[in-house]
Amino acid sequence: MRPSGAEPPGRDGPAVFVADFGSEAQWVAGRSWAYPDGGPVNPGDNKLDHLVADPAYSRSGVFRATPRPDGNWDAGLLTTEGSDEGFMVRTGDVLEARVRLPEEIGAWPAIWTWRDGGNEIDVFEYHPDNPDLLELSNHVREAHRYHRDPAVRPGGWVELTVEFGARSVVWWIDGTRVFADRRGVGRRWAAYLIVNLSVCAGRYHPAPGPEVSEMSFEVAHLRVHRPGWGGSGGSGGLGRSGTGGAGRAGGAGGGG
């Protein structure tokens, strides 16, 4: 265990995955087996999402949502599950991401993992009605932290680092360690990445008001390091070896 405030790990290790959100080989847009039947909707998880493959909703790294006439919201989602490269994060990997948080009430951004009906780690979730709070969760072995931070605010930028340890998943926010769950993911864990902007339906967090015509959050970069791996970087084939196929359990999922 590293002392609180220690420098995040992995920066000197090779980047085995560098996100290119415009790459159809890396990412599938607008569907995910974390949603029932792969989507496009998931009302059972208190979401107004209607997932769309339109590149304007995700492929630039700006994840958007706009209202539909039926009361749902067209929403952007990208996942590595089902892509040609099929990248998966694994035990021991370190993920780094820089994100701009949304401002609109009802927005629900997340970076998370999923495979075979579970294997979910929430790198972060955010709701602007709790303006200074990030939700950090390990659903593999059930550990959670509501982290309040004056640097966390609607429209603000946050640097996230997560180490997916076998015995402890550790989160850093803007370079400071804020949570070590002491539960971990186990030695053989692997899961696909999901980045998306959901829209709250109002049960746990307020739904968007009628005046809201668009919401967005941005991911400036997302990288995965694999300490001890001796390759020269890359993404796809590393994700496939030694794991099962794409999970189709279609549970509630959704980063929450």
Image (spheres, rainbow, N blue to C red):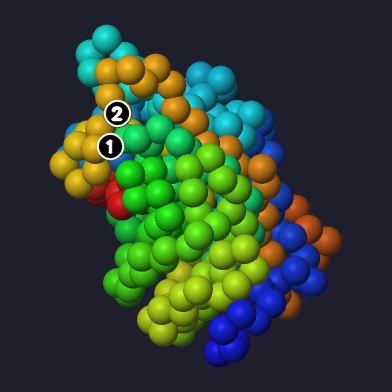
Q: Inspect this view and state whether residue 191 appears.
A: no
Q: Residue at x 42, y 64 (%)?
A: 148
Q: Residue at x 50, y 60 (%)?
A: 150
Question: Is the residue marked by circle 1 packed among few (<14), some (14-19), or many (20+) residues within 10 Å?
Answer: many
Mark 2 element type: loop
Label 2 belongs to which residue?
208
In this view of the protein, which residue sits in the foreground, 143 or 215? 215
Q: Residue at x 60, y 72 (%)?
A: 176
Q: Which label belongs to residue 177?
A: none
- Residue 116 in percent (x, y) is at 35, 55
Work out how far the residue at label 1 is from the one at label 2, CA to CA, in angstroms: 7 Å
To which quarter of the image does residue 227 belong?
bottom right
- Residue 142 in percent (x, y) is at 30, 72
- Residue 251 in percent (x, y) is at 25, 48
Q: Are marks 1 and 2 in contact (CB under 8 Å)?
A: yes
Q: Amino acid at mark 2?
A: Pro
Q: Amino acid at mark 1?
A: Cys
- Residue 250 in percent (x, y) is at 27, 44
Label 1 belongs to which residue?
200
In this view of the protein, which residue sits in the foreground, 132 or 167? 132
Quadrant assignment for the N terminus: bottom right
- Toward the front, the furthest residue is 150
In this view of the protein, which residue sits in the foreground, 83 or 252? 252
